[in-house]
Image (cartoon, rainbow, N blue to C red):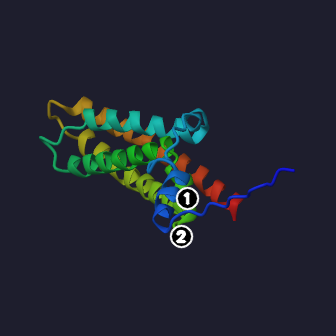
Amino acid sequence: MMTETVVTVQDAPNSNAANKQSERGHPLGWIKINLDYFKTVPGILKLLQLVCGIICMSCANTRFEKATHFFMFVAVMSFIFTLLMVVAYLISLREALAKFPINVLMSELITTGIWAVCYLIAFIIQLAIWSSSWFPDRGANIAAGVFGIINTGLYGFGTYLLYVESRSIS
């Protein structure tokens, strides 16, 4: 008859940290590229906001009228905000932050609504100033105001979609 030998191996106390690190994987393992988001209506809307923001920034000229400074401020800051949101959705940061006590959806809803109102004020000022002006860059600045109208609608629709999403979760 053969005897059986059972061996029980316990981890050394120092190897716990290494085991936990290997269980979690790579330190940036939470990053998952999510291109499918940009096939949805909110994803396409964010990309359109970026494109329209680029057009607003490229058409507006602050050289002659000081009121265009506010329009440029709104266009640049909303572009940066939207770019950060696009990156956050691209790397699935919103899902990674779900375990923290941060309501990302409500934060995005509020800031998108604020940018919609800011764009509304900015394009009204832009078109009011440049429609009565005779400076050389008049046409480009009026075009910037028109694209400001379009971006106001895009941010307004984005706010509506975020509101509907927040109501469906609650």
Residue at image mark 2? 101
Residue at image mark 1? 105
* Side of 115 relative to 126 (left or right): right
Q: Position of residue 126 (x, y in %)?
A: 29, 45
* Side of 123 relative to 21 (left or right): left
Of helix, strand and loop, which one carries label 2? Answer: loop
Q: Residue at x 17, y 35 (%)?
A: 134
Nearer to the camera, 109 or 75: 109
Q: Position of residue 100 (x, y in %)?
A: 53, 66
Query: What kind of residue is marked 2?
Result: Pro
Q: Position of residue 40 (x, y in %)?
A: 61, 37
Q: Residues within 10 Å of mark 2 (few under 14, many from 20)?
A: few
* Snapshot quadrant of residue 103: bottom right
Looking at the image, the residue that sits furthest to the front is 1
Q: Residues within 10 Å of mark 1 (few under 14, many from 20)?
A: some
Answer above or below: position of 92 versus 14.
Answer: above
Mark 2 vs mark 1, CA separation in Å: 12 Å
For residue 41, which numbered disc appears in the image? none
Query: What kind of residue is marked 1?
Result: Leu
Q: Residue at x 56, y 62 (%)?
A: 11
Nearer to the camera, 163 or 130: 163
Nearer to the camera, 41 or 119: 41
Q: Residue at x 60, y 38 (%)?
A: 41
Of helix, strand and loop, which one carries label 1? Answer: helix
Q: Position of residue 147 (x, y in %)?
A: 38, 36
* Side of 50 relative to 98 (left or right): left
Q: Between tags 2 and 1, which lies in front?
A: 2
Q: Residue at x 52, y 60 (%)?
A: 104
Nearer to the camera, 23 or 33: 23
Looking at the image, how many numbered discs can be counted on the residues? 2
* Snapshot quadrant of residue 36: top right
